[in-house]
């Protein structure tokens, strides 16, 4: 199960960034998953997942309530620049 979301930031200078991210995980029949789960987060510039950029984040022990989760994604200066660059490209997040 993966989810892609597009984020465009009009500027991304060197700084640390902590941002909240939430979503809902379901099985193939649409039923919400139960947790806790380990989430793997990846960033792409391409909606077909062919242009991986930045780190792969692993977040263990994420609680799900009716499949819904909320986490903080923490990236440092260099990762912000790698992922968001000058803000001219869309960023897709895979969970």
Image: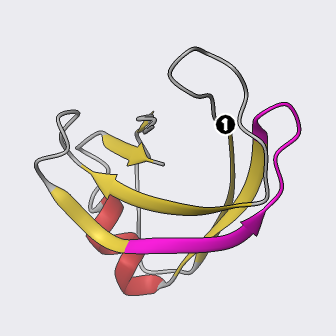
- The structure residue drawn at horizontal position 38% and vertical position 72%, both measured from the top left corner, is 56
For residue 55, which quarter of the picture?
bottom left
What segment carries the magenta color? 56-68
58 magenta-colored: yes
For the stretch drawn in magenta, the main secondary structure is strand
The answer to whether residue 86 is left or right of residue 29 is left
**In the foreground, 34 or 19:** 34
For residue 4, which quarter of the picture?
top left
**Residue 13 placed where, x, y %?**
41, 71
Q: Residue 93, relative to residue 67: is it above or below?
A: below
Element under label 1? strand
Residue reaching furthest to the top:
29
**In the foreground, 27 or 41:** 27
**Residue 23 placed where, x, y %?**
67, 36
The answer to whether residue 94 is left or right of residue 33 is left
- The structure residue drawn at horizontal position 29% and vertical position 39%, both measured from the top left corner, is 90
**In the foreground, 9 or 52:** 52
Q: Residue 15, relative to residue 94: is it above or below?
A: below
- The structure residue drawn at horizontal position 32% and vertical position 50%, both measured from the top left corner, is 87
**Which residue in the protein does label 1 denote?**
23
Total numbered circles: 1
- The structure residue drawn at horizontal position 43% and vertical position 39%, both measured from the top left corner, is 2
Instruction: Indicate the colouring scheme.
Output: secondary structure
């Amino acid at each position: 199960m993966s989810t892609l979301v597009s984020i465009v930031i009009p500027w991304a200078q060197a700084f640390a960034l902590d941002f909240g991210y939430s979503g809902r995980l379901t099985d193939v029949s649409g039923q919400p998953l139960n947790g806790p789960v380990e989430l793997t987060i990846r960033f792409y510039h391409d909606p077909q997942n062919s242009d991986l950029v930045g780190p792969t984040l692993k977040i263990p022990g994420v609680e799900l309530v009716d499949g819904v989760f909320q986490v903080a994604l923490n990236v440092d200066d260099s990762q912000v620049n790698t992922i968001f660059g000058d803000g001219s490209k869309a960023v897709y997040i895979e969970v």
